[in-house]
Amino acid sequence: MADRGCPLQPVPLPAEVRESLAELELELSEGDITQKGYEKKRAKLLARYIPLIQGVDPSLQVESRTPGPSQTTAAAPKQQKPRPTNSRDERFRSDVHTEAVQAALAKYKERKVPLPSKRRSVLVHSSVETCTPPDTSSASEDEGSLRRPGRLTSTPLQSHSSVEPWLDRVIQGSSTSSSASSTSSHPGGRPAAALAGPTAHTLIADLHSAPPDVTTGLVEYSHCERPQSASMRGVPRGCSGRLLDTAGGVPVNSRVSSKIQQLLNTLKRPKRPPLKEFFVDDVEELLEVQQPDPNQPKPEGSQMVVLKGEPLAVGTPLPPSLLAALQRWGTMQPKAPCLTALDTTGKAIYTLTYGKLWSRSLKLAYTLLNKLTSKNEPLLKPGDRVALVFPNSDPVMFMVAFYGCLLAELVPVPIEVPLTRKDAGSQQIGFLLGSCGVALALTTDACQKGLPKAQTGEVATFKGWPPLTWLVIDGKHLTKPPKDWHPLAQDEGAGTAYIEYKTSKEGSTVGITVSHSSLLAQCRALTQACGYLEAETLTNVLDFKRDAGLWHGVLTSVMNKMHVISIPYALMKVNPLSWIQKVCLYKAQTALVKSRDMHWSLLAQRGQRDVSLSSLRMLIVADGANPWSISSCDAFLNVFQSRGLRPEVICPCACSSEALTVAIRRPPDLGGPPPRKAVLSMNGLSYGVIRVDTEEKLSVLTVQDVGQVMPGANVCVVKVDGAPYLCKTDEVGEICVDSSATGTAYYGLLGITKNVFETIPVTAGGTPVSNRPFTRTGLLGFIGPDNLVFVVGKLDGLMVVGVRRHNADDIVATALAVEPMKFVYRGRIAVFSVTVLHDDRIVLVAEQRPDASEEDSFQWMSRVLQAFIVYPWVLHICIYIFRGKKGHIHIFEI
């Protein structure tokens, strides 16, 4: 038509015709009429307007003519040729132009359609389909070609130059006619004239690209700012190749089901913000910011100086190393008793001599180095880590395994026996074993039989654990070494001797490495501080696999050829007086206990008249750093002083997994000063300041000294927060130790190792106090009179409420001061904190005795609350009251 100079004159359709066309579209989408019926009715409605749109006289339609290269023949209805039944009548539509107009109108329309409906939305399909430019549609196009966007039309792209002016005019005349139902309700629609020209041309060009899938379409069509519209079902086949918008603004293929579109919308939604973001903005303004109290106590003393311990004795007759001591005692005095194990009834089931310890350790070392192979290669090489899995009731085999690993130049990693396959604590131990590269676990036959088994009968793989090879080290499983075989162990260097695990308050487990030189220095320092002598007897109630139980009962005892009586924990539960009875039976000179053991002994001592503790010269309280241990010590002394216990015998000590033994009180015959107590104001401690108070008040904390610094060590106290500045003399801080008898690192954790094991304390002017690094102990305290060390809590138990600090041990000590013996179990009190609106709230939980009445418990709780009422926190005290198999929980809140 352009060749004849006939301009395109689009004629707007009347409103009733547009409404009829929209109803036809709706009926077709709902399946009320067939495609053929739809085409016939649509052609009938448009019959009178087609000649006017094309700008040609109706009489000229019957003339036969040959179409040009850019035209498509549009035969008159009465001259059309027969078509296949599956083809559509496309003489009056061009899919390329229709798609362009549809996309443009959908982009700029203002009304958004609700998400998905089975009905086809009238708003999405514009009646511009009826305003098709002349001779641009294909004469006949099969249905398959309509489903491929790359073949939407056979019209060459060079015809776009004649189409654009027509498209501009059609959009201007039909921008408000996208739907008959929306014409009256939304008369103020946005004009569509802005869509003409380059925008329409761009959309037309985009339709010739390959059809994207649901995922790739998100990227390919991201530049088209398409509004959110409803996903449609029942779209006519002529429009099946185009992209539609879901309610979430995600373009998808129209053939995708609505459920998939909804799933895609759900996946594209932003995730819920973290909980902390709910307390930002307006909530921040509502929270009261606590300002520092101008009247709060502040430290007034002078800056402290580094406290130096007595020098470590040199030239003593001790063996040069721990393994040399084992070899000496095992060959020279093989009959000397080394360790006696007890059963749950208190009977001695086995006594390990130094000769047996030496021979069994040699067998194990030879077996580990020569009899374990993997693919014809040794399974282990010097420096490898080996797990020791032994119960608390078998100290003999643990001792053999520990020294066997040292002789084989292997690194023992003592751990607890896993209870179940999915135990939470066991998972953390498994993480430690994996990070240490442990591939072998040593155990006993009895312990292995009690472990969970797989279907194959082998030990099950515990959750979080690396694959392990289990080796039973009972006598029949070991190989006797040749007479000319000797271990080449060197235990005097900086190599790792063993790894001790530690669990933080968050539940994570780390391994602390102890070198051979640190191990030897620790044994010598303990020997000097405690005055250990050969052939002395030590009663050990602690866990022999770690901490003070390992240092005293397994290591230092062998250095001095001592005899250790190991009390299993199961026996203590049955008979709390068992350790006292063994002290009397074996005339032990030293006992290693905790304050809980002393407390249990007080409850079970009634009727025991033949008990004598006169043989004891040191009663080492391993948890003497806990503030509430003083009450157990005082009560134990009051009861057993009449049975031979001297006051100077009780020796609290402070221990740390990182720094090993920090301080220990010594009897006067070893040069120790008299013991001291400090009654401190908890109000001052909450600000980190030391203020002496009177003992009559409930809001005070009474602590005892933990003795003097270990021989060969230097100690200082640094600030808890920020740089390690030295504290003042009346200020509470973290105790740091410089000694050759401390741990060396967290295995495999270089970052926190530098922060803990390589601290350089500085003065207020920034000058380092020493050229040697200090080790942080995690203990909070201060240096008192006579250079005695006082500990008021641990860093793991520190809780900050507002601007004030509180320690879990302090809270427990205050609660126990309110007549705890009558109402609650002394060892069953827990203190923790919960965070509420950027602040901590302290919770105290105590278990009540079954014979106490509820009225008594309420009175006790009231008195405990009075002790804490001076502090600005909300304190919950939960008392679990037993009544047979039932229980009740009472919660008090200030």
Image (tube, rainbow, N blue to C red):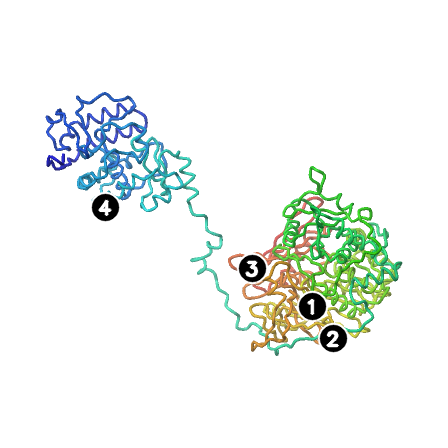
**Earlier residue among tags 1 and 4:** 4
The amino acid at mark 3 is: Asp
* CA gap, disc 2 and disc 4: 91 Å
Residue 243: x %, y % from top left? 33, 38
For discs 1 and 4, the disc positioned in front in the rendered view: 4
Mark number for residue 310?
Answer: 2
Residue identified by numbered label 1? 702
Residue 780: x %, y % from top left? 64, 67
The quarter holding residue 841 reads bottom right
Q: Residues within 10 Å of mark 2 (few under 14, many from 20)?
A: some
Left or right: residue 533 compared with residue 727:
right
For discs 1 and 2, the disc positioned in front in the rendered view: 2
In the image, residue 595 above or below residue 711: above
**Earlier residue among tags 2 and 3:** 2
**Earlier residue among tags 1 and 2:** 2
Residue identified by numbered label 4? 198
Q: Quadrant of the N terminus?
A: top left
Q: Secondary structure at mark 4?
A: helix
Quick check: marks 1 and 4 in contact, CB under 8 Å? no
Q: Residues within 10 Å of mark 1 (few under 14, many from 20)?
A: many
In the image, residue 175 above or below residue 424: above
Residue identified by numbered label 3? 840
Q: Secondary structure at mark 2?
A: loop
